[in-house]
Image: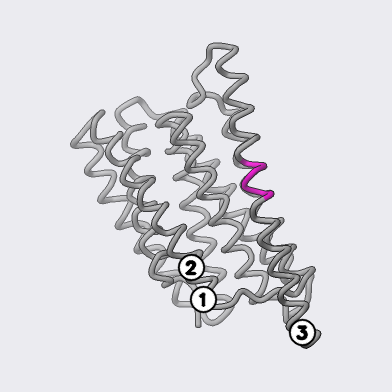
Amino acid sequence: MTTETRRSAVGGRRLRLAIAAALALVAVGSTTVQAHEVVADQPSNGDPLSLAAVVVAVVSVGILGGLAVILTETSLRARHHTLFDRCLGGLLVILGVTLGLSAVAEYPTVAVAGLVGGGFLTRSLTTHAEHDHHAELALGTLVTHRTIEGVALVALYQSGSTIGLAGALVIAGHATLETAVVAGLYAERGRPIAALAIGVLQAGFVGGAVVGALLAIVLPLHLSVAVVAIGAGALLVVGNITFFGQHTPA
């Protein structure tokens, strides 16, 4: 085994360990927040502190995954990347379906409009982002995905704590993989540039979460259902794109 192969194997193990540890962090953090809310007899889907805690945890997951790639000089093999994409894409679609059904049960007409609108907007934004080139193509597209997932996470939390926790775990795994991909693409330009790309990616997610949270606060109930439906439509599109690997350049 050559030195480069050995380094790649060790780096791959470290990256998998980082992903597992980060997902555990999100799970423990989310369930701890929910436990405090049960004791206080408060609903989790209305507590901005619980949402903020999960957003911070998901961002930390992404940063951890990106740093693992930069520090270990790990390259994700195509077959492993494809396997992760298919698993996470399928889970995102399942979450989108679950979220969409919960919205339709509340206000069918509003929910259907939100589903169609969210899916169309997400696809349009993603297509526009893909006009860039090479590493910029991936970064632009993935920043768009992360922003949409920030809004979707708020929508998941609006629908209930159990779905919110499941969504946080899936989005955290997705964040780690996407950040690792971006870090790998920019690593050859130097660690500072790669770190900056990681920061831009996470900023997109935080921005999406802030927008989603503000909409949930200021909108009446039936329009809040529309936000949930838009998030569901976004998850369905992002899930399909992720499953078929359309967002990562060859």
- In three-dimensional space, the C-alpha distance between marks 1 and 3, rounded to whole angstroms, equals 19 Å
- In three-dimensional space, the C-alpha distance between marks 2 and 1, rounded to whole angstroms, equals 6 Å
Amino acid at dot 3: Glu
Secondary structure found at label 2: helix
Q: Nearer the viewer, residue 213 or 242?
A: 242
User: Which residue does the numbered mark 2 point to in the structure image?
Assistant: 83
Amino acid at dot 1: Arg
Q: Is residue 64 left or right of residue 227?
A: right
Q: Residue at x 61, y 74 (%)?
A: 76
Within 10 Å of the Cα at label 3, are there few (<14), some (14-19), or many (20+) other Cα atoms? few
> Is 73 covered by the magenta stretch?
no
Within 10 Å of the Cα at label 1, are there few (<14), some (14-19), or many (20+) other Cα atoms? few
Q: Residue at x 52, y 81 (%)?
A: 133
Which quadrant would residue 53 be assigned to in this image? Answer: top right
Q: Quadrant of the N terminus?
A: bottom right
- In three-dimensional space, the C-alpha distance between marks 2 and 3, rounded to whole angstroms, equals 23 Å
Q: Residue 116 appears at what percent x and percent y?
A: 25, 51
User: Which residue does the numbered mark 3 point to in the structure image?
Assistant: 4
User: Which residue does the numbered mark 1 point to in the structure image?
Assistant: 79
